[in-house]
Image (spheres, rainbow, N blue to C red):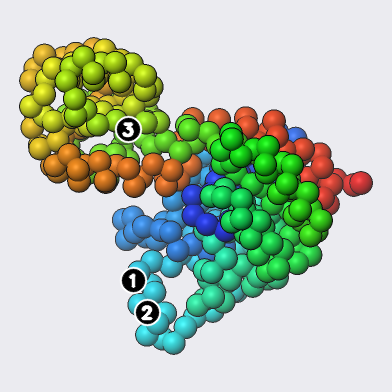
Amino acid sequence: MTINLYITSTQSFSGKSAVCATFIHRMKKDGFRVGYLKPFSSAARVLSESMIDEDARFIKETFNLREPLETLAPVVVTGQRMLKILADGGADYSQEVKKAAQIVSKNKDIVVMEGSDNFREGYIVNLSLNEVANLVDAKVITVVGYQNSLQVVDDTLTALTRLGERLVGVIINSVPENRLQYVHELVLPYVRKQGVMVLAVLPYQQTLHSINISEIVDALQGELICGECLDDLVENLTVAAMNVDQALNHFRQVKNKAVIVGGDRPDIQLAALETSTKVLILTGNTRPNPMIAARAEERNVAIILSPHDTLTTVERVEQFFGKTRFHQTEKVSRFALLLNNLLDFDELYRAIGLVEE
């Protein structure tokens, strides 16, 4: 009998997609036949007139899954579809999900199912968290992204209240180093007394909250004029509003960074290029002089022209840090290493019935 394991989260950008990818990779490595399904999606975009869920596309391509995307993500609600649902007075897509689950579970030991970004979605199409879990008889793991200790406890107990016996346990993610001891010594004993199994506590990792250069280009609607490193990850952001000596000293202290600098400051741009810089973002839509462009190409540093002023450029880029999906191989690899070290998979397999006690 195929086991359905539903991975949910209490908020966006908590690491749910990375957990799914890591589980699939580890379970396949351990010899299990593994399928994937994302029953309901509201985080989609229209691509070539088709409704494509990007999480499902990433998993399909990463693991070379044979099922079409329309099966892996059977219910994708875009703005256009929502208009129709509202005009029609609602919709019920439960049969579509049930059919897709039957297809992906064929000849599988386990199907890893990716849930929505929070517990509130899906009601309008009868695919809320509990409705999906009951429909496919799934065991559930909830990923709780750390914001503060009170929120972690409340989110964990919310998962228990909503899911009851279906909840296998929680994974607490992105805990700052200075709060790890507090979480282990106070939060974990408390929630365990309430009946919640904590499968892993994962520390905050800067790389996992980074963004790649192509995402910066999109955020700014800017022009990439130098660089062939769109997938490179940028971990830090710095603004050059100082003299050259101060800038150089500051740049040396910040690694893997994007530097936002006026297009008319070649001296600051050159200083940034002498340190660990991934991309120069030139504000005011000013093109770099040939010397800067040549030096950037030599050091494999991208240059983006931002059409905005410095303040707007900073605001647009900052809002993306920590709020991008795990669709970069480097991110997934680092997260997998972290989770494999901190989660007892043998214990997990016993808890979900994948192996006998």
Q: Earlier in the sequence, mark 1 or mark 3?
A: 1
- Which residue is disc 2 drawn over? 84
| Amino acid type indicated by mark 1 | Gln
- Disc 1 marks which residue? 80
Q: CA distance from mark 3 to mark 2?
A: 42 Å
Q: Which numbered dot is residue 194? A: none
Task: Name the residue type under label 3.
Answer: Leu
Rendering quarter of residue 250: top left
> Mark 1 to mark 3: distance in Å?
36 Å
Foreground: 277 or 295? 277
Residue at (92% x, 46% y) in the render: 357
x and y, in percent, of residue 92 in the image: 54, 79
Instruction: Kindly check if marks 1 and 2 are in contact, taking CB atoms under 8 A apart as contact.
Output: yes
* Mark 3 vs mark 2: in front: 3
Could you tell which of marks 3 and 2 lies nearer the N-terminus?
2
**The quarter of the displayed image where residue 341 is located:** top right
Q: Are marks 3 and 2 in contact (CB under 8 Å)?
A: no
Left or right of 313, for residue 113: right
- Quick check: 60 above or below 259? below
Dot 1 and dot 3 residues touching (CB under 8 Å): no
Kindly state the secondary structure of the residue where label 2 is placed: helix
Q: Residue 33 location in percent, x, y? A: 72, 44
Quadrant (top left/top right/bottom left/bottom right) for the N terminus: bottom right
Dot 2 amino acid type: Lys
Q: Secondary structure at mark 3?
A: strand
**Residue 253 locus on image (x, y percent):** 37, 19
Q: Residues within 10 Å of mark 3 (few under 14, many from 20)?
A: some
Residue positioned 40% across, 31% down in the render: 235
The vertical placement of 116 against 173, above or below, is: below
**Nearest to viewer (mark 1 / mark 3):** 3
Q: Which residue is mark 3?
A: 237
Where on the picture, by quarter, is residue 39? Answer: bottom right
